Amino acid sequence: MAPPDKRLFRCGARCKDRGVEPTSTPAGEAHDLVSRYREVRAWTERLAAPLSPEDQTVQSMPDVSPTKWHRAHVTWFFETFVLAENEPGFSAFQEQYWFLFNSYYEAIGPRYSRPMRGVISRPGAHDVGRYRSNVDDRMSDLLDRVDEGTLAKIAATVELGFHHEQQHQELLLMDIKHVLSLNPLRPVYAGSPAAATPATPLSWLDFDGGLVEIGHEGSADRGGSFCFDNELPRHQQWLASYRLADRLVTNGEWMEFIADGGYRRAELWLSDGWGRVNDEGWCAPFYWSQIDGVWFEHTLHGTWPVDPTLPVCHVSHYEADAYATWAGKRLPTEAEWEHAAALQGPQEATSPPRGSDVSTETWHPRAAGPADGTLRQLFGDCWEWTSSAYLPYPGFRPAPGAIGEYNGKFMSGQMVLRGGCALTPPGHARASYRNFFPAGARWPVTGVRLADDGGR
Ligand SMILES: [Fe+2]
């Protein structure tokens, strides 16, 4: 199995992301990797802590994976892509785990059926904890004793493992949200609602067009920070002048869309979206339900009346597009979104840091706050649908070997989302980050920022 190509998964300046000077010696770099490894792995366990073994076993639909599967799969990633190639005398913790916890890597071998993950009662949540501890100990041993040559060989893969686990931390929360939504007892994961804030008006920000560059701008040679391969290569795009709304569409505005027949008017919808409206009975965002004429919303902190000042979330690309049409606007392209976000500040997301206590979070998008002449809610509230299909950038080349399956093979039939959401680990997202989901997906934390042509 070939290690990832460092051109595609860069790690040179990971310390820069954290406001710490990069360590320059191999021993210092290994020490930094160990400490970051422990930090990332511990956060996964904190997220799972409020969930019982029974909670962690349920798979509520094929797109959702059980919590214990997420915990095991991210462990399998380190065991498969780091330990198997580099640990002296490597022996798998359990041979069968290679089959159970391989997600989609054809080059690794056969794997268990994804839609059937919820019927696997063994290994249980506790057994998965033992698997995690075993791999953690072996990863620490490897990194503690690593020589300079091996460190140079594995550092990019370990770094990719951190970001992979962070992606699964977000998925773990999105998935358990769906699991708990099907329980008539309306169970709470953790946290509590944010304090109510007044609604703020939407303003428009104008951006000049022209020949612009998008894509991650780091370079291994220049000590660039980490990015996924799908953010590369940086390249030129032509943009006409455009405008972006300075905040996300709110629940209150979505209620106006519903009241105006938004889900009943075919002329607002893309054909495939209108088919889903009719086939699946869509009449409101995914987690909304009406009780005695009042809209309620299922959240990770319980079921509450819909707060009209919060961003609407859990809407599909089809719904986002229909809303934009209804509003006489459109969705931004991914190039417009990135160009505007990059103009606003550093590439790394500035979502508020989270503490170590999961019970103190809202785990939900927050209100926009007062207008300040910038794009509000860019990171940390809702992933924002764009009108761009998820396609390779000009010159994109997947890495050789199994790791090349990470992103490239999904560049078909999906739409790009930008930003980040309330469940995204702090520091994980950035302006060039390309998330993607099928146009009909409603279970991710997805919202809407309107765009318009400029020069009006
Ligand atoms: Fe994965």
Image (cartoon, rainbow, N blue to C red):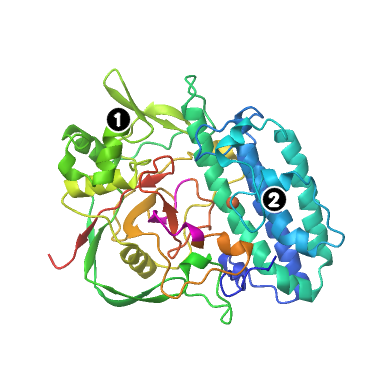
Q: Amino acid at mark 1?
A: Gly
Could you tell me residue 80's position as x and y percent? 71, 56
Respond yes or no on whether mark 1 lies under 8 Å from ligand 1: no
Residue at x 47%, y 58% (from the top left corner): 350
Left/right of residue 29 with respect to residue 342 in the rendered view? right
Task: Please say if 319 is above or below 230.
Answer: above
Could you tell me residue 273's position as x and y percent? 28, 43
Q: Which residue is mark 1?
A: 281
Q: Are marks 2 and 1 in contact (CB under 8 Å)?
A: no
**Residue 455 lies in the magenta stretch:** no
Q: Which mark is residue 23?
A: none
* Mark 1 surroundings: few (<14), some (14-19) or many (≥20) residues within 10 A: few
Question: In terms of image quadrants, where is residue 250?
Answer: top left
Q: Which mark is residue 76?
A: 2
Can I make out residue 446 in this image? yes
**Residue found farthest to the left:** 456
Left/right of residue 428 with respect to residue 266 in the rendered view? right
Q: Which residues are magenta?
A: 409-422
Residue at x 76%, y 51% (from the top left corner): 136
Residue at x 44%, y 40% (from the top left corner): 364
Residue at x 53%, y 47% (from the top left corner): 170
Which residue is at the front of the view, 67 or 31?
A: 67
Element type at marker 1? loop
Question: In terms of image quadrants, where is residue 83?
Answer: bottom right
Left/right of residue 443 with respect to residue 353 in the rendered view? left
Element type at marker 2? helix
Question: In terms of image quadrants, where is residue 214?
Answer: bottom left
Which residue is at the front of the view, 278 or 157?
A: 278
* Mark 2 surroundings: few (<14), some (14-19) or many (≥20) residues within 10 A: many
**Residue found farthest to the front:** 110
